[in-house]
Image (spheres, grey):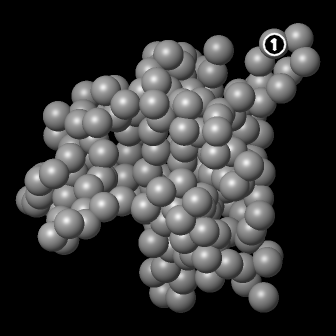
Amino acid sequence: MLSSAIWPATVECGDLLLRPIYHRDKREWLQLRQRNAAWLAPWEASNPQPGGQLPGFGEMVRSLNRQAKLATALPWVIAERRGAAREPVIVGQLTVSSIVWGSALMATLGYWVDQGSAGRGIAPTAVAMATDHCFRVLGLHRMEINIRPENAASLRVVEKLGFRDEGLRPRYLHINGAWADHRSFALTAEEVPEGLLTRWLHDGGQHR
């Protein structure tokens, strides 16, 4: 079965790892989100339906797990080994979603990172790890990332990694209470024959 062949999966690079999100992560995840509420609020997805709300943590994990079982998503947390015990601490979330098989072999990637961990190469390293996994392990051909034009931090991530700017998508997603424009960035497997992570680290990017 395809889903059991691709999920669960864990990807590692030094002290950084992408691992499945679990129900037992609730307390740590909610505390991290609470600390980053103001940092993330301008970029948060919202529900445009009358009275619509986003799912709570448990419902989110159940939905992501259903998608993973259908081989249409890879729901990871971004964790970093810290301290003397090198215990992984959650520093963000990265989800590969809308996986299309057949003749398309493409997916969309979204992520967020703790403000206190920003600027240390965690986001671009995690995106490179996930993209390489999708290209080299799953055999996908195209990865797409959609970003608000005002989100300078996320724009720097795709620019550092060499994602191609494919233009503006007007009113593409409902964000923070309103339909918002996004810029679409993409990369295909042929553009990184050596691997995106290898190129990123070779170009001086590092998780430190």
Q: Is residue 199 visible?
A: no
Task: Locate residue 120 relative to residue 147 in the image: left or right.
Answer: right
Quarter placement of the N terminus = bottom right
Task: Locate residue 197 relative to residue 179 in the image: left or right.
Answer: right
Q: Using a 10 Å C-alpha cutoff, classify the residue at mark 1 as few (fewer than 14 neighbours), some (14 to 19) or many (20 or more).
A: few
In this figure, which residue is indicated by the disc labeled 1?
Answer: 83
Quarter placement of the C terminus = top right
Question: Where does residue 180 sit, x and y in percent of width and height?
Answer: 13, 52
Residues 112 and 187: in front is 112
Q: Residue at x 26, y 56 (%)?
A: 46
In the displayed orientation, state which residue is furthest to the top: 84
Q: Is residue 114 visible?
A: yes
Q: Residue at x 20, y 66 (%)?
A: 51
Judge whether 58 appears above or below 149 on screen.
below
Where residue 115 sits, quadrant-wise, is top left
Q: Residue at x 12, y 57 (%)?
A: 179
Residues 144 and 78: in front is 78
Judge whether 16 appears above or below 24 on screen.
above
Numbered disc 1: secondary structure: loop
Disc 1 marks which amino acid? Answer: Gly
Question: Where does residue 194 sit, x and y in percent of width and height?
Answer: 64, 46
Q: Residue at x 52, y 62 (%)?
A: 60
Residues 105 and 21: in front is 21
